[in-house]
């Protein structure tokens, strides 16, 4: 992680290392605000701007994926490999969704348009919320 920050030209601060540690292997797709709230008690000098700046630098460098599945929040995924995401319309949680093989692979030409990258989002109800809905209706 230290090499990653140095490679990107970021100053090595305890706050930035904490952000990387929190993201490492995280599958909850946290927003910058959620990361800030989680780390602020341990790092009182942490600012929301530091969280956003660190995440944006990491996203631009291809070290993580910015997910704009929800118009109200930007979520971040430490897995930069192309994959699909699912937003639950009830609890608003974001999940990785294995949608099986997707035929289009970038770069791809569609009617003269050169597609260099693409994003695919799914929306609906997650298994937990679906189960709660079913339980309420019984």
Image (cartoon, helix red, strand yellow):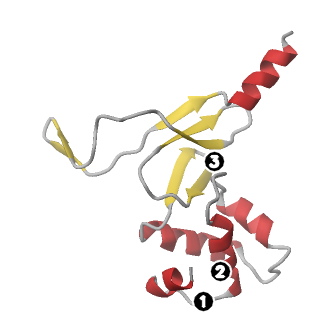
Relative to 102, 24 lies left or right: right
Answer yes or no: do the residues labelled 1 and 2 have beta carbons within 8 Å? yes
- Label 3: how many residues lie within 10 Å, few (<14), some (14-19) or many (20+)? few
- Residue 17, disc: 2
Q: Element at badge 2?
A: helix
Q: Give the percent coordinates (x, y) of residue 65.
A: 49, 58
- Viewer-closest of 93 and 111: 93
- Label 2: how many residues lie within 10 Å, few (<14), some (14-19) or many (20+)? some
- Viewer-closest of 84 and 71: 84
Q: Residue at x 42, y 71 (%)?
A: 61
Q: Element at badge 1?
A: loop
Disc 3 target residue: 72
Q: Earlier in the sequence, mark 2 or mark 3?
A: 2
- Residue 12, disc: 1
Q: Nearer the viewer, mark 3 or mark 1?
A: 1
- Label 1: how many residues lie within 10 Å, few (<14), some (14-19) or many (20+)? few
User: Which quarter of the rendering shows the C terminus?
Assistant: top right
User: Which quarter of the rendering shows the N terminus?
Assistant: bottom right
Answer yes or no: do the residues labelled 3 and 1 have beta carbons within 8 Å? no
Extreme residue in the left direction? 112
Q: Nearer the viewer, mark 2 or mark 3?
A: 2
How far apart are labels 2 and 3 at the CA level? 27 Å
How far apart are labels 1 and 2 at the CA level? 7 Å
Q: Give the percent coordinates (x, y) of residue 31.
A: 65, 57
Image quadrant in which you'd find residue 105:
top left
Q: Earlier in the sequence, mark 1 or mark 2?
A: 1
Q: Residue at x 64, y 77 (%)?
A: 50
Image quadrant in which you'd find residue 21:
bottom right
């Amino acid at each position: 992680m230290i090499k990653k920050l140095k490679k990107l030209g970021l100053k090595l601060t305890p706050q930035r290392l904490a952000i990387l540690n929190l993201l490492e292997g995280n599958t909850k797709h946290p927003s910058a605000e959620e990361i800030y709230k989680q780390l602020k008690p341990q790092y009182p000098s942490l600012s929301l701007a530091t969280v956003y700046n660190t995440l944006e630098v990491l996203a631009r460098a291809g070290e993580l994926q910015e997910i704009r599945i929800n118009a109200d929040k930007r979520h971040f995924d430490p897995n930069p490999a192309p994959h699909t995401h699912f937003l639950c319309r009830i609890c608003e949680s974001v999940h990785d969704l294995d949608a099986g093989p997707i035929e289009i692979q970038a770069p791809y030409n569609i009617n003269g348009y050169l597609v260099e990258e693409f994003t695919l989002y799914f929306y609906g109800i997650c298994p937990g919320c679906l189960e709660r809905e079913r339980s309420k209706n019984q």
